[in-house]
Image: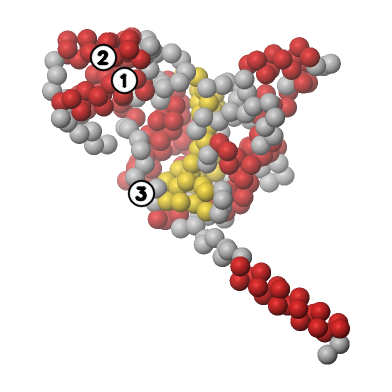
Amino acid sequence: MSHTSDLALRLDRIAAALERLAPPPPAPARFDAADAFVWHAADQSFQPVAAVNRVPRALLKGIDGSARQLLDNTRRFADGLPANNALLWGARGMGKSSLVKAVHAEVQAQSAAAGNMTGDLKLVEIHREDIATLPAALAELRASRHRFIVFCDDLSFDRDDTSYKSLKAVLEGGIEGRPPNVLFYATSNRRHLMPREMVDNERSTAINPSEAVEEKVSLSDRFGLWLGFHNCSQDDYLAMVEGYARHFDLPIARDALVREALEWSVTRGGRSGRVAWQFTQDLAGRLGKTLPL
């Protein structure tokens, strides 16, 4: 056997061994298996979610205007009409992510009841740290007959983070752009998805201040729908608590409910939808009631 033939045989054996060691390719996503999925970047797969953690939209108080706009936008998308990517930004604990999940459930239920196959709407969550793999996820979603809301909770970027470029290209600027059957919803505490001190610092030190932050700030401009969430008033907070108490039929007098809810908010140092829900969980536990959702 010649030296060349022996080398070729060894290379074939090495290649075969590497193929045996390589992990199998991920199985094609079965989007009929559930209404919601989580994108796993490590193996580039979509994990179905059997039961989504959410509350009915009617229980989300103090955000009626934002809820109407997001619901209308989502309905249009489910019906195959033009719709905008949405950025829900503002105060913590005011129901931004809860609203996305509640609106998806409502629109999906309405579409199913109407027998609207165009509106077979799926919710896909992508974690903030996996944004750089978003193009890979969209490549698979693009080929599906379903329509998708890709949802990223608590989205923000720091000084040295360049993964925002993947999102920026997907939303509008890339060659392929966003697939027609995909809409992107994100929540953030920051209106421009970056810290204010970072914006101010770059403006103060740059030769051309307006251009220094344009690339990063322009990311938020690619969301056609901006929905602001603001700090909770006492009336809104009590409306949330009373709404939960009625919905779950908690046996407590209104005066006692109001007094305990206000005391709870003082111990938490503020009022929000999250604080109202945490109080409701505590109250239900003390009353021996479960909270089925």
Mark 1 nearby-residue class (10 Å; few <14, some 14–19, many ≥20)? many
- Residue 153 vs residue 111: left or right? right
Q: Is residue 24 above or below residue 164?
A: below
Image quadrant where one finds the N terminus: bottom right
Mark 3 nearby-residue class (10 Å; few <14, some 14–19, many ≥20)? few
x 13%, y 23%: residue: 251
- Residue 69 vs residue 161: left or right? left
- Mark 2 belongs to which amino acid? Ala
Mark 2: secondary structure: helix
User: Which image quarter: residue 204?
Assistant: top right
- Residue 246 vs residue 9: left or right? left
Q: State the image coordinates of residue 250 (x, y, percent, origin top left).
A: 16, 25
| Mark 2 vs mark 1, CA separation in Å | 8 Å
- Mark 3 belongs to which amino acid? Ala
Circles 2 and 1 in contact, beta carbons < 8 Å: yes
- Which callout, 2 or 3, points at the residue further toward the start of the chain? 3
Which label number is shown at residue 50?
A: 3
- Mark 1 belongs to which amino acid? Ala
Q: Is residue 58 visible?
A: yes
